[in-house]
Image: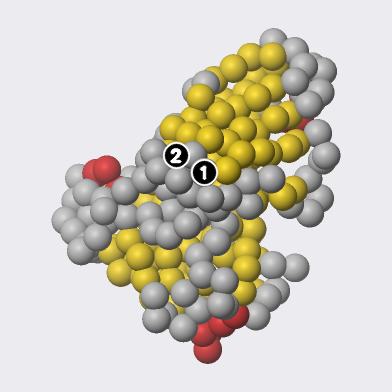
């Protein structure tokens, strides 16, 4: 099975900073990758699919890139409401594996 | 408005069974694959199982294969998860989620999630 590895597992950044989260697949998955945001105590929310396509209603400060095995989620100009745990997920066939998550906090 | 409402969770002893339900509304249920995802307390998301629109394609995580059974009733707009031989490590919040693309697209990402139902396996 393909493993999804996120890094870092947590980070602390200042408001206005650019934050980058990495997700690596153990085998190529083309662009079949999604990013989710889960705020504390809330349900996960789809941010990005097909590696780089922004879900409707998601602020443009979120962006995704990558293909094959290496992917990134970038938050430009971090806002207080972006405090959350972010997960990547592959969906090119079962198992639809999630990464371990990256917890983003405000410094 | 898309709504997914899970039910059926609770406290159950190890080795016993539980059946989760997910009532869907606000979209054409039989046009979409559906999924179960769980989250143990303080842990990350774990994909559990998926079923396509007509139940013709089903998948399970290795951790639940042979113990859990996913099913759906399109006439009732409902998704189910039959959980047998429950273990302490099955303790989690169980979410149902909707596939973001309709039939013909295969399993894709999840654009709507329910609030979850908590399953606690303990003696």
Would you say the residues marked 2 and 1 are in contact, meaning their CB atoms lie under 8 Å apart? yes
Question: Relative to B45, is B24 above or below?
Answer: below
**Residue at point 83%, 39% (across, down):** A60
Q: Which residue is mark 2?
A: A25
Q: Nearer the viewer, mark 2 or mark 1?
A: 1
Which chain hosts label 2? Answer: A
Q: Residues within 10 Å of mark 1 (few under 14, many from 20)?
A: some
Which corner quadrant of the image does residue B101 belong to? bottom right
> Could you say whether the residue bearing mark 1 is in a helix, strand or loop?
loop
> Could you say whether the residue bearing mark 2 is in a helix, strand or loop?
strand
Residue found at the very far bottom of the displayed protein? B75
Tell me: A50 left or right of A91: right
Q: Which residue is mark 1?
A: A68
Circle number at residue A7:
none
Q: Answer with mark 2 or mark 1, whichever residue precedes in sequence.
A: 2
Q: Residues within 10 Å of mark 2 (few under 14, many from 20)?
A: many
Q: Position of residue B34 (x, y in %)?
A: 50, 68
């Amino acid at each position: 099975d393909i493993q999804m590895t996120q890094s870092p597992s947590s980070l602390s950044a200042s408001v206005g900073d650019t934050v980058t989260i990495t997700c690596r697949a153990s085998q190529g998955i083309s662009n079949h990758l999604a990013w989710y945001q889960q705020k504390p105590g809330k349900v996960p929310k789809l941010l990005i699919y097909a590696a780089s396509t922004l879900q409707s209603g998601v602020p443009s400060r979120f962006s995704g890139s990558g293909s094959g095995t290496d992917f990134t989620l970038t938050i430009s100009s971090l806002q207080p409401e972006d405090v959350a745990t972010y997960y990547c997920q592959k969906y090119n066939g079962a198992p639809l594996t999630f990464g371990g998550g990256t917890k983003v906090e405000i410094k | 408005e898309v709504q997914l409402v899970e039910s059926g969770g609770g406290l159950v002893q190890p080795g016993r069974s539980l059946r989760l339900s997910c009532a869907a509304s606000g979209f054409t249920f039989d046009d979409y694959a559906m999924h179960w995802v769980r989250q143990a307390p303080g842990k990350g998301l774990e994909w559990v199982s998926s079923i396509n629109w007509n139940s013709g394609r089903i998948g399970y995580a290795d951790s639940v294969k042979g113990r859990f059974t996913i099913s759906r009733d399109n006439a009732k707009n409902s998704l189910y998860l039959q959980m047998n031989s429950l273990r302490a490590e099955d303790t989690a919040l169980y979410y149902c989620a909707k596939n973001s693309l309709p039939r013909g697209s295969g399993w894709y990402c999840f654009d709507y999630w329910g609030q979850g139902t908590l399953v606690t396996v303990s003696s």
